[in-house]
Amino acid sequence: MEDNEIVSLYLRRDEAAIERTSEKYGSRLRTLAYGIVNDLPTAEECENDTYMEAWNSIPPHEPGGYLFAFLARITRHISLDCCRKRSRLKRDAVLCQLSAEMEQCIPAPDDVQCRMDSAALGEAINGFLRTLGEEQRNVFLRRYWYLDSIAAISKRFGISQSKVKTMLFRSRNRLRDYLMKEGYTL
């Protein structure tokens, strides 16, 4: 079933929308959640919460042809919230490491103008990603969107871990420079 047809089911408040979404994207959403929470039951819970959130948010929003991106964003936020709740007293080392890597090239969230301009920042980051080659973009997304480890990325793309680290380092530097050119202060 096409994304537009699934979205129209949501808009009509037809419960079959959730079933069709699960059939088409369930395993991908579960995999995304599992990559973040590292626990299958929690990943399944995040997947189910995604369907509920989609049910509640699609009538005002119409994702149309980008349904998976819409759902993946919801899944990612729900999964990260699960991690935060689970580790309130102790910090999750992977999330801390990735945050530390990205804070070198993303404007600080404490800046009021950055919070107000988050959509523009998102567009700027998307613009930057379009400047990267396919392999660099995929490595960058696997690390910072899917939260894959360096070893997993290395294995997935058949390249050395040192090459992955170098690509990520250079991409972060390029992102920082790109955002500075776009007028963001770091």
Image (tube, rainbow, N blue to C red):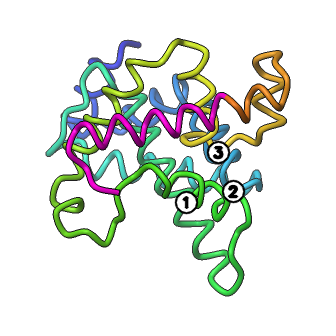
Dot 1, how many residues are within 10 Å of its Cα: few (below 14), some (14-19), or many (20+)?
some
Q: Amino acid at mark 1?
A: Leu
Name the residue nearer the viewer: 87 or 68. Answer: 87
Dot 2, how many residues are within 10 Å of its Cα: few (below 14), some (14-19), or many (20+)?
many
Residue 8 image point, x, y percent: 22, 26
Is 19 left or right of 88, judged from the image as shown? left
Q: Nearer the viewer, mark 3 or mark 2?
A: 3
User: What residue would you read off at disc 1?
Assistant: 80
Q: Judging from the image, what secondary structure is the residue with disc 3 in?
A: loop
Q: Which residues are magenta?
A: 167-186
Q: Which mark is residue 147?
A: 3
The residue at 22%/38% (across/down) is 182
Q: Please state, as top left, top right, bottom left or bottom right, where the N terminus lies in the image.
A: top left
User: What residue would you read off at disc 2?
Assistant: 37
The residue at 36%/13% (across/down) is 2
Image quadrant in which you'd find residue 131 = top left
Is 84 left or right of 38, judged from the image as shown? left
From this viewpoint, which residue is outermost toward the bottom? 89
Q: Spatial distance from mark 3 to mark 2, Cα to Cα?
A: 10 Å
The residue at 49%/54% (across/down) is 104
Q: Is residue 69 above or below residue 110?
A: above
